[in-house]
Amino acid sequence: MDLAALRQEQLQRAADVVRQDDFDVLPPRFIGGADVGFEQGGEVTRAALVILEYPSLTLVEHRIARVATTMPYIPGFLSFREMPALLEAWQQLSQQPDLLFVDGHGISHPRRLGVAAHFGSLVDVPTIGVAKKRLCGRFADLAAEPGSRQPLIDKGEQIGWVWRSKARCNPLFISTGHRVSLDSALHWVEACTAGYRLPEPTRWADAVASGRPAFLRWQNSR
DNA sequence: GCGACAG
DNA sequence: ATCTTGTCGC
């Protein structure tokens, strides 16, 4: 693969990313969660999409897509590796969300195009990046209290929030994906967090993707 | 040159 | 991400 070409594609696409709020984002009726994983030693990419109703945070739909992996994992180019499976799962959705939480970064990326920003701008859906690790940028130490936050800064601009969602847990990296401001991104993630480190949409997507007991129980009870 | 490096 | 049991701490 030609990284120089992909890098150019990122710069071009990043210019189309909307970092401000959309009027129809408020209030969301359906919030989605996306999680991508790999199987068979990485040869198969598995994308899970779930739809929750807001504010009840009730699971209303789940979809899983498996496609042949086309690219290796290269820091900074993750979206190209996950995009095919995400698009496949997206097409299977019978109810598209008003807002989507994507595992990974949004604009908190070296060229401001993490997977959340890339997918969001591609299908033109409001997205928020929810990552568990830092990719770039710097931030001051967080207080131990849950709820504490610090701006994530890179090259002189704020590209996200580092937020401690739960006591004694490592913080989350929240950023704009597409059509959602940084402050709103943190607002919606807070509104969808229910006592666990990860917000509900992300937790459910993860549970569905890996066949967690919580999901299996939900599936049997209907 | 050295260290960092989403999932 | 994934391979995987027990184990330390609240």
Image: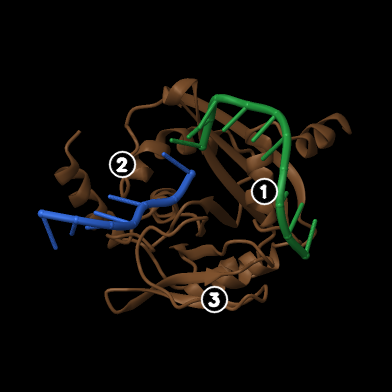
Chain colours: A brown, B blue, C green
Residue at mark 3: chain: A
Q: Residue furthest right?
A: A221
Residue at mark 2: chain: A
Mark 1, other Cα within 10 Å: few <14 / some 14–19 / many ≥20: some
Q: Position of residue A84 (x, y in %)?
A: 41, 34
Q: Please, is residue A47 above or below residue A154 in the view? A: above
Instruction: Say what amino acid the circle numbered 1 marks.
Output: Arg
- Would residue A104 be found to the left or right of residue A208 on screen? left
Judged by depth in the image, the label closer to the viewer, 1 or 2, is 2
Secondary structure beneath label 1: helix
Q: Position of residue A179 (x, y in %)?
A: 46, 65
* Dot placed on the residue nearer the N-terminal end, 1 or 3: 3
Instruction: Say what amino acid the circle numbered 2 marks.
Output: Ile
* Dot placed on the residue nearer the N-terminal end, 1 or 2: 2
Q: Residue at x 45, y 53 (%)?
A: A116
Co-location on one chain, circles 3 and 2 = yes
Q: Report how far apart the C-alphas of labels 1 and 2 lie in the structure.
A: 25 Å
Mark 2, other Cα within 10 Å: few <14 / some 14–19 / many ≥20: few
Residue denoted by label 2? A74
Could you say which disc has been placed on residue A203 in the image? 1
Q: Position of residue C4 (x, y in %)?
A: 63, 26
Residue A22 in view here: no
* Dot placed on the residue nearer the N-terminal end, 3 or 2: 2
Residue denoted by label 3? A142
Which image quadrant is residue A24 in? bottom right
Q: Residue at x 76, y 37 (%)?
A: A215
Q: Please, is residue A81 above or below residue A134 in the view? A: above
Q: Report how far apart the C-alphas of labels 3 and 2 lie in the structure.
A: 29 Å
Q: Residue at x 45, y 78 (%)?
A: A140
Q: Position of residue A80 (x, y in %)?
A: 34, 40
